């Protein structure tokens, strides 16, 4: 690498707290991880789990510093409607039918996006927080642990797409090494691939190197997962294409506090998409969680650049900006400038 950043814990903590306060009034899902163009700063807070989780910072050059931020727990839906909800927009709408909404129980109603280019949604759970939404809901098996796995069979039934294991390469997220993930994928996810149902490989971060537990990160984790599952006969049982999954899934975040230029983040994001497409080996590519930090103008400029690229990339089939919540994509429950820029 051409340069390494060594960021003190005090500076990082100050930066994160500033970002959380200014950009995300709902701490249940705050700053997650950031991929910097020439170095990586990986930051995680919690996801849809019951207990608060620590923040982990993965620094370029293989070092790691640990800090802890108080995180409010996010309620997890125990059960819910497992019906398939048809999309409200055709494939000729803005975004080519690729754009979706990432939301949770603190989000306003998704109905305010009904006359846009949005076609699908997800909330990191296997049952929708907004069961009245007209958008196609994609269930997620966040991890193999309870409560996420408790109603998986019931909630996954009847859906066209299923996502699996949220950021297994992060200790504060699904936290799974490749061997464990393959084992649980074979028993919990792979059997759902029947009757035209498409299943996704675990959603990885944009990090690289190894995390503090020694687990590979980002596309390295994903590549090892696909290779190992491909070599396992029970992960390709009698399928014509002998593939363990129909699509791969990745998450990306920009520099902390918008500290990089917009162009830096654009370059970083485009590089990550290229890496995912290469790792996918002809599978579909999903980006169900991505965000540039910083002011609205910077985020809008970022979206105006990357959205046409995503829409024109035939390998990318689904993507969602983080996230539908007042202070990011909505204001008083209605799409704001950033939300309208994304939704079209």
Image (spheres, rainbow, N blue to C red):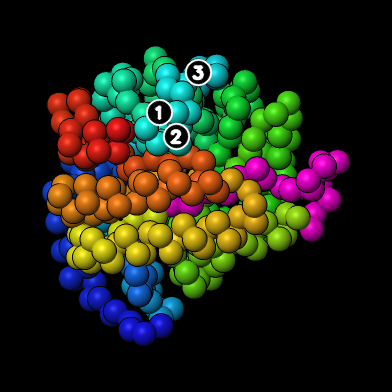
> At 70% from the left edge and 29% from the top edge, which residue is drawn?
196
Asked if residue 242 is among those painted magenta in the image, a careful observer would answer yes
Disc 1: which residue = 93
On the image, the x and y values in percent for residue 3 come to 33, 84
How far separated are the C-alphas under marks 3 and 1? 15 Å
Front residue (pair 186, 90): 90
Front residue (pair 193, 177): 193
Q: Are marks 2 and 1 in contact (CB under 8 Å)?
A: yes
On the image, the x and y values in percent for residue 26 come to 23, 39
Place residue 59 in its image quadrant. bottom left
The local secondary structure at tag 3 comes to loop
Asked if residue 291 is among those painted magenta in the image, a careful observer would answer no
> At 74% from the left edge and 48% from the top edge, which residue is drawn?
243
Q: Earlier in the sequence, mark 3 or mark 2?
A: 3
Q: Which residues are magenta?
A: 231-251
Disc 2: which residue = 96
How far separated are the C-alphas under marks 2 and 1? 5 Å
Marking on residue 198: none
> At 53% from the left edge and 46% from the top edge, which residue is drawn?
314
**How packed is label 3: few (under 14 Cα within 10 Å), some, or many (20 or more)?**
few
Front residue (pair 15, 244): 244
**Disc 3 or disc 1, which is closer to the eye?**
1
**How packed is label 1: few (under 14 Cα within 10 Å), some, or many (20 or more)?**
some
Looking at the image, residue 341 sits to the left or right of residue 100; the answer is left
């Amino acid at each position: 690498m051409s340069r390494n950043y060594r960021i003190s814990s005090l500076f990082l903590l100050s930066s994160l707290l500033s970002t959380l306060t200014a950009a995300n009034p709902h701490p249940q899902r705050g700053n997650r991880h950031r991929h910097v163009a020439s170095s990586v700063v990986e930051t995680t807070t919690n996801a849809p789990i019951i207990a608060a989780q620590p923040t982990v910072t993965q620094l370029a050059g293989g070092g790691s510093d640990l800090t802890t931020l108080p995180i409010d727990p996010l309620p997890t839906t125990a059960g819910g409607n497992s019906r398939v909800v048809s999309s409200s927009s055709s494939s000729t709408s803005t975004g080519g039918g690729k754009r979706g909404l990432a939301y949770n129980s603190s989000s306003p109603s998704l109905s305010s996006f009904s006359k846009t280019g949005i076609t699908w949604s997800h909330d990191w759970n296997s049952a929708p927080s907004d069961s009245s939404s007209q958008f196609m809901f994609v269930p997620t098996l966040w991890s193999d642990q309870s409560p996420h796995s408790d109603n998986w069979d019931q909630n996954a039934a009847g859906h066209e797409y299923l996502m699996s294991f949220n950021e297994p390469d992060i200790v504060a997220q699904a936290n799974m090494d490749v061997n464990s993930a393959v084992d649980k994928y074979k028993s919990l996810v792979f059997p759902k691939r029947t009757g035209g149902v498409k299943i996704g490989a675990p959603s990885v971060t944009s990090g690289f190197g190894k995390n503090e537990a020694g687990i590979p990160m980002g596309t390295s984790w994903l590549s090892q997962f696909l290779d190992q599952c491909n070599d396992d006969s029970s992960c390709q049982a009698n399928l014509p294409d002998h593939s363990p999954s129909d699509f791969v899934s990745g998450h990306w975040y920009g520099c902390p506090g918008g500290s990089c230029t917009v162009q830096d983040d654009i370059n970083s994001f485009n590089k990550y998409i290229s890496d995912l497409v290469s790792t996918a080996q002809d599978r579909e590519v999903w980006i169900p969680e991505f965000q540039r930090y910083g002011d609205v103008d910077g985020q809008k400029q970022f979206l105006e650049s990357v959205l046409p690229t995503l829409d024109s990339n035939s390998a990318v089939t689904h993507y969602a900006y983080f996230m539908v919540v007042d202070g990011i994509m909505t204001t008083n429950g209605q799409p704001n400038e950033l939300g309208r820029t994304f939704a079209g």
